Structure formats: C-alpha cells, structure tokens
C-alpha cells in the first residue's frame, strides 16, 4: 500500500518538539521526504535520525532556521527544493507563547512584537516562499505528483475563544493566522494550492506544560475540557496529515479544530 504522502516533500517548522516532532514522524511514515526546521538544530537532528532509522525509504534532513527571520525561511524552502526536488507540503507550525505575554495593560511592546514576528510574520513568510516553490513543482502523473500543494498553518483554539487567563499577543497572533490563511486560500485556490489552519486545543507539550507548571493551574483548565484531558501532540499531527494529503483535496480555507470539543461546548464543573 503506498503511503498517503508517498513521494511528496514536506517542510515542517518547529520539528524538534511537540506537534512538529510528531508530524515529522507521521508524514515520513506515510512516505514523505521531510525537511525538519527548528531553532534548536540538535532537537531537529535527533528527530531526523529517528526517522532515518525507522523509515529508511524516505529522506529526512534537519536544518536550523528562525522562522522570525525572512531570510531563514527562504533558505529553508530553497534547501527543501534543492534536496528533494519539490515542495508539496508546508507546515508552518513553529510558534511561541512568551511567559511575559499578559493582558492589555501589562504586555510590553517588545513581547508583542516578538510574538508577532514569530507567530504571524513567520507564517506569512512560510506561505510566501512555499507558494513560490509549489507553483514550480514538476508534474509526474506516474508518481501522482502535481503542481501546487498543501500549506497548513498552526493557529490555536484561543483564536476562536477568548481566554480568561490572558496572553494577548499570542491570542491576537493566532487570530491573524486564521484570517490570513482564509484569504490566501481564496487567492491561490485555482492554482491547486490549498491553505488551511489547524486549531489545536490545549496539549501535553512543553509549550503549554512549562507554563502550566502547578496542579492548580492545570486543574483550572481541566474543568473546561469536555474529554477531561489535555490533547496529545500526535492527535494534532493526525489532523495535519489529513490536511497535507489528497484525502482533503476539497478542503481549503478552513479553521480545522482538533480541540477535543473545547470550542463547541459549554462545560460546567459539576
Ligand atoms: P513546542 O514548544 O513543543 O515545540 C515548538 C518548537 O518550535 C520547538 O522545537 C522550538 O525550538 C521551535 N521554535 C520556537 N521558536 C522558533 C523559531 N523562531 N524558529 C524556529 N523554530 C522555533 O510547541 P507545540 O506545543 O508543539 O506548539 C507548536 C505550535 O502549536 C505552536 O504554534 C503553538 O502556538 C501551537 N499550539 C500549541 C498548543 C499547546 O497546547 N501546546 C495549543 C494550541 C496551539
């Protein structure tokens, strides 16, 4: 059985941890050659080595890039095309939630700007260079390869719901990811380039668990989770795989929620 991403090339940002790590492994298991991009090169290299060991039929490469720098993103997309010949899937996933991000009164401008630089501009640049590359994708019908591709941008459930515990810059950046992705989806739909956002619920990854570092903080959130648990990064990766593959060939411009029902439910503690 060919994999769902057989012969495809995927670039994943934030590939060294959490959602990016699980997505890199899952995409490779489905036949994709993967370029793993992270600020933490050692972490991305460990994931690439693991993939090479488990799936010797695909190629995995790691590279260091800061998605908050346009030149780094351009270089990463160029590297994917030079290394693997094309770019079919761009997963703009890297993001930060800064510990000093707070409410309107307390958030410093430098924290706001840093958050926007990485979470929003980084996604814009990822889209920009991926679109340019996808327009040039060689077509090979025998291998099911076409011009165009799938771009997936990681937003968050806080782009859909206000959170009582503020992280204003983060929330605003993720809301903007949704708006930007919808518009790009409309602009590039006729080129065979699909763009979707994925909205994870709260997950058991370092990004959130470093922040929810006491039982009290975790319990406060748990009350709101219909399934009574945090999500796992691999559960988001499975949603991303759907959006990356041809199984979602008629899906573009969505805010794809993988949040355990959080944003659809009114939950009470008792
Ligand atoms: P994580 O902290 O486990 O992993 C993030 C990875 O991104 C790390 O390897 C880190 O080194 C890398 N990274 C950080 N800044 C970077 C930069 N400037 N350039 C390149 N790489 C960078 O996080 P995660 O939980 O897997 O989160 C991934 C995405 O999911 C983020 O966009 C986050 O906002 C979003 N998200 C997470 C949750 C959650 O609960 N964890 C919920 C909703 C949305």
Image (spheres, grey):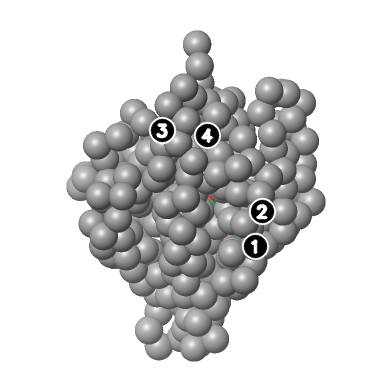
Which residue occupies the foreground of this view, 149 or 229? 149
Which residue reaches farthest top? Answer: 1
Q: Is mark 4 on a helix, strand or loop?
A: loop
> Which quadrant of the structure image shows residue 47?
top right
Spatial CA span between label 4 and label 1: 19 Å
On the image, the x and y values in percent for residue 114 come to 54, 78
> Which quadrant of the structure image shows residue 169?
bottom left
In this picture, residue 214 sits left or right of residue 194: right
Q: In which quarter of the image is the C terminus?
A: top left
Q: Name the residue under label 2.
A: 79
Q: What element carries label 1?
A: helix
Visible in this render: residue 31? Answer: yes
Badge 2 crowding class, 10 Å Cα cut-off, few under 14, some 14 to 19, many 20 or more, is: some
Q: Mark 1 points at which residue?
A: 75
Spatial CA span between label 1 and label 3: 25 Å
On the image, the x and y values in percent for residue 98 come to 55, 70
Q: Name the residue under label 3.
A: 245
Badge 1 or badge 3: first in the primary sequence: 1
Q: Are the residues tagged 1 and 2 within 8 Å (C-beta)?
A: yes
Which residue occupies the foreground of this view, 191 or 13? 191
Spatial CA span between label 4 and label 2: 15 Å
Residue visible at 72% across and 53% down in the picture: 63
Q: Is mark 3 on a helix, strand or loop?
A: loop
Q: Mark 4 points at which residue?
A: 8
């Amino acid at each position: 059985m060919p994999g769902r991403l057989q012969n495809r090339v995927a670039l994943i940002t934030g590939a060294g941890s959490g959602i990016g790590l699980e997505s890199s492994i899952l995409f490779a298991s489905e036949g994709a050659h993967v370029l793993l991009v992270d600020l933490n090169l050692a972490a991305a290299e460990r994931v690439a080595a693991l993939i090479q060991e488990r799936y010797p039929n695909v190629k995995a490469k790691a590279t260091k890039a800061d998605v908050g720098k346009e030149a780094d993103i351009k270089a990463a997309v160029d590297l994917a095309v030079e290394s693997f010949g094309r770019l079919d899937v761009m997963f703009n996933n890297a993001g930060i939630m800064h510990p000093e991000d707070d409410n309107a009164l307390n958030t410093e401008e430098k924290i706001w700007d840093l958050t926007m630089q990485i979470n929003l501009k980084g996604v814009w640049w990822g889209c920009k260079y991926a679109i340019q590359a996808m327009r040039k994708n060689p077509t090979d019908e025998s291998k099911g390869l076409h011009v165009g591709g799938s771009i997936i941008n990681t937003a968050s459930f806080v782009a859909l719901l206000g959170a009582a515990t503020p992280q204003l810059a983060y929330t605003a950046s993720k809301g903007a990811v949704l708006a930007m992705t919808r518009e790009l989806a409309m602009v590039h739909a006729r080129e065979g380039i699909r763009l979707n956002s994925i909205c994870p619920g709260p997950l058991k990854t370092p990004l959130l668990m470093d922040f929810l570092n006491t039982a009290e903080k975790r319990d406060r959130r748990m009350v709101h989770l219909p399934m009574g648990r945090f999500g796992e990064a691999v559960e988001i990766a499975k949603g991303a795989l759907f959006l990356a593959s041809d199984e979602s060939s008629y899906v573009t411009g969505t805010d794809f929620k993988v949040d355990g029902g959080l944003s659809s439910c009114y939950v009470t503690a008792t």
